[in-house]
Amino acid sequence: MNKIILTGLFLVSTFCMAQGPNMEDAYKNVEKKVIEWRRDIHQNPELSNREFKTAAKIAAHLKSLGIDVQTGVAHTGVVGVLKGNSPGKTVALRADIDALPVYERNDLPYKSNVTSEFLGEKVGVMHACGHDTHTAILMGVAEVLAKNKDKIKGNVKFIFQPAEEGPPPGEEGGALLMVKEGVLKNPDVDAIFGLHINSQTPVGVIRYKSGGAMAAAQSFTINVKGKQSHGSQPWAGVDPILISAKIIDGLQTIISRETELTQEAAVITVGKIKSGVRFNIIPESAEMIGTIRTLDYDMKAKLNKRMEEMVPMIAKAYGGEATIEIRDATDITYNNPELVTAMLPTLQRVAGESNTQTQKAITGAEDFSYFQREVPGFFFFLGGMTPGNTESFPHHTPDFLIDDSGLLLGVRALTEMSLDYLNRS
């Protein structure tokens, strides 16, 4: 009973403190800036580990607010530390800043026309996953908090992370490299919060899941070796394209026939096949790359084992050879249950109880999980779909769209969570 009373008193006190007139003025003043930053970043996207202009824009903004800034973290990352007017714990807020190799297909006035090179091919570059909104939101949070230092008991660390979509082959990057370089130290981070915009969740809605919320992601590369021959004489060779098709079919049976999907979801997807140069030549080799998504560590180990067994055996059955290499990309995104319980009243206050909704785990992946392996973390989803829309476009597609009117709620949520966490502590 006493604990309930104390919690209630805490919520009332933090509500009064965090929602004072200075805060409301700050929110009103920053919304237009956040939208402008987002559109500028959207129009000028950069691929993973190449976010030079984006990083410069972020660093200049943080420095203008009097925030201590470190650049070049994990190649192109930017980290800012805002010290409150009184001592306390340290909370970290993270935004990812990289874009994707996707050609944008819409008529937005701030549409990206940027092109670059990815895996040796010319590609369009687009913020097709909303990282531009995450960056702009966190820049807005930094401005609001910097102008209200008197309300901060402790420190806020702003982590602008490159390469969430994965570093280029042969390079390190992303959250894993940031952790390796000590981003959660000096000052030591006690908790970390992050959000992800969602094009299929209405503006004004926040969704979350306690515990395992997003899947572990792995990438794999399969190299198939056959024997080249004329296309008119397949009996004279060993067809690596045929073998690749059989391997793909076999991999799907691991999911459909060997995986207990009533326990947790799991996915194996081949995203690219490269083989051959001409219509009438059976090539000598083929390469496949793809992704594995799992929400359970035992299932992850089983899928890996079966793939490593199956791939060479299928190739051998058709007269060829094949190897598979599996690499970790992200861990399971795990929301600390105690932290979720503590911060849920804050989200309900800023979004409304009916707009703060639970959801099931998803097979999307986030390298925010690497921060959560080190310190308690809470990662949630922010609505970006225009209410009443009958059609929305998925992430990582050329038609992906976000309604800017949803960004201010993201600023409010991260700001209020930071203040409530620090002052409660």
Image (tube, rainbow, N blue to C red):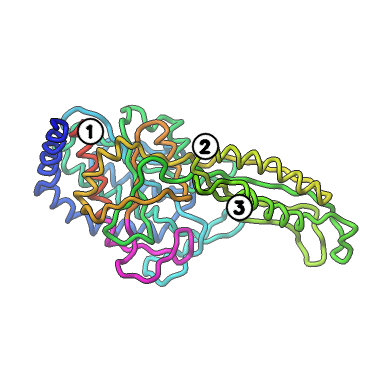
Task: Give the image location of residue 98, x and y in percent.
Answer: 44, 50
**Residue range of the region highlighted in magenta in the rendering:** 383-407
Question: Is label 3 or label 1 in front?
Answer: 3
Horizontally, residue 104 falls left or right of residue 19, namely right
- The amino acid at mark 3 is Ser
Seen in the picture, residue 417 relative to 289 is either above or below; the reply is above
Marks 2 and 1, Cα distance to the nearest angstrom?
A: 38 Å
Question: Is label 2 or label 3 in front?
Answer: 3
Seen at 43% across and 56% down, the residue is: 129
Horizontally, residue 169 falls left or right of residue 82, namely right
Marks 2 and 3, Cα distance to the nearest angstrom?
A: 18 Å
Can the viewer see residue 68?
A: no
Question: Is label 2 or label 1 in front?
Answer: 2
Seen at 81% across and 51% down, the residue is: 318
Tag 2 secondary structure: helix
Circle 1 sits on which residue? 83
If you read the primary sequence from the N terminus, does the residue marked by circle 3 or circle 1 appear first? Answer: 1
Task: Give the image location of residue 308, x and y in percent.
Answer: 68, 41
Front in this rendered view, residue 413 or 81: 413
- The amino acid at mark 2 is Tyr
Seen in the picture, residue 278 relative to 208 is either above or below; the reply is below
Seen in the picture, residue 384 relative to 140 is either above or below; the reply is below
Marks 3 and 1, Cα distance to the nearest angstrom?
A: 52 Å
Res 256 label: 3
Circle 2 sits on which residue? 297
Task: Give the image location of residue 214, x and y in percent.
Answer: 44, 46
